[in-house]
Image (cartoon, grey):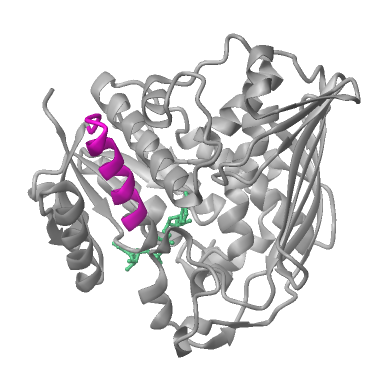
Amino acid sequence: MERIPVAIVGCGGMGTRHLFGLAELERADLNPFDLVAVCDVDPARAERLADEAQARLGRRPAPCADLDSARRLGAVAVDITTVPRFHHSLAADAMSLGLDVMVEKPVGLTLAAARQLKDAVAGSDRILSVAENFRRDPTNRLVKALIDDGVLGEPRYFHQSSGGGGNLMAISMWRHLKDESGILFDAGTHYTDMMEYYLGPVVSVYAQMRLFEKIRYNPAATGGAPASNPGGVYGQSQAAMPAEFEATADDALFAMVNFASGAVGQYAENRAEHGRESWARSVHGSAGAVEIPKDRSGRPLVLTLDRSKTYTGAEILPLVPRFRLDDVTAALFGGPQATAYGLDFETVDRLLLAVEYAEFGNAIATRTPPEVGLEEGIRAIAVCYAMMESGAAGGRIVTVDDVLDGSVGDYQAGIDDAIGLGA
Ligand SMILES: NC(=O)c1ccc[n+]([C@@H]2O[C@H](COP(=O)([O-])OP(=O)(O)OC[C@H]3O[C@@H](n4cnc5c(N)ncnc54)[C@H](O)[C@@H]3O)[C@@H](O)[C@H]2O)c1
């Protein structure tokens, strides 16, 4: 089969991790792509990723600065992994150049950005895939099977709470700047995608939100170990960031979530936690509950039925006899009912990004819609902003529909002004 010429646009941490995913596909002889170009506004980053690609794929893509150059270098598809504020405009520009697109989440920095993209691409026959990786974790596929096959009974309650970080920088400075994203939005769009993946549409929310840590510290700037460095790819860029800086993005969100199904959710994300790192996610139904480990952690599920019978890891599989992973996930993780149990974060991360790429390749080859497209990507940001809009308004009930159509948007208005989308 002829390979699809592709370019990575955005050669920072996630661009590098996407390359690692492509290399996993190559290793498994499943790579539908030929990486022909790597683009970044910072030429040194593009050069670095081209070198890394040479080492991992055996071919050196051409470094370049923009979409048009990538197209001239032969790309017919692009994988956009820039900072969030350019996702909507780069995706729209790429599609208008005739390119198929995979874009990292969030699909837009605000709903106005996402709506602008939606208007720009209306009627386009190009593929637009939003790179949402958490739901592709085999562990999350198994949770979905437990829910869909009725093993939990009628779903009633979703719970997620996580904390950590203290006053340290989370990966990069932009994750603490409101006009660039902030950590609640950056992490939150993954989690709202997971909520709707498991339990269907969210209707309304109520939340409290805080900015607890107004100054953030970056130990890597003064030779210390990075405070957080997923995939091990952020050390160099963190060393060039300030040792301390003012945070403008809120860092703690505590919400109640109302699903269309009647289920209720509770969501707490405290990125200013000074106790130990914490994580809990669970789905509770009329027949039992499942405790879900952190995405990409490689840890097993714990299912309890009838308040007493506990099933861990592979013991769960006989309860969902129809559970099957898609072919690529099965090939990479080791079988149609494989799990990620026992694998480390870096390995699961790379394999999920490989799965994401494979699905994008299949969507291009068959001209079929990807699992997470523009609509799903927009809903994920709308549910996340519904919580943040509610929190910013002191806790009023906000509907997702009002955020989607722009009737509620005061919190985002300042961001829209900053990125040139203000009214
Ligand atoms: N799915 C996941 O698990 C996951 C994990 C981390 C990051 N992300 C997402 O990936 C995206 C990138 O995050 P990151 O951590 O790699 O950030 P980063 O800051 O490390 O890298 C962003 C890169 O984009 C480049 N860039 C900025 N504007 C550009 C433009 N107009 N054209 C080309 N390049 C441009 C920057 O120079 C930088 O190299 C974000 O949207 C983030 O939310 C997703």
Near-viewer residue (59 or 386): 59
Q: Is residue 73 magenta?
A: no
SS assignment for the magenta stretch, majority: helix
Splitting the image into 4 quarters, where does residue 236 fall? bottom left
Task: Describe residue 186's horizontal placement relative to residue 352 as left or right.
Answer: right
Q: Please, is residue 86 above or below residue 356 in the view? A: below
Q: Residue at x 63, y 71 (%)?
A: 249
| Residue 64, quarter of picture | bottom left
At x 8% / y 49%, what residue is drawn? 72
In the rendered image, residue 147, in percent from the top left (x then y), is placed at 70, 21
Q: Residue furthest top?
A: 322
Q: Is residue 65 left or right of residue 265?
A: left
**Residue stretch rendered in magenta on the structure:** 16-31
Looking at the rendered image, the quarter that the N terminus falls into is top left
Check if residue 20 falls in the magenta segment.
Answer: yes
The residue at the point 38 percent across, 20 percent down is: 327
Residue 130 image position (x, y, % from top left) = 43, 40
Ligand 1 lies in quarter: bottom left
Residue lying at 44% horizontally and 51% vertically, measured from the top left: 346
Q: Is residue 127 visible?
A: no
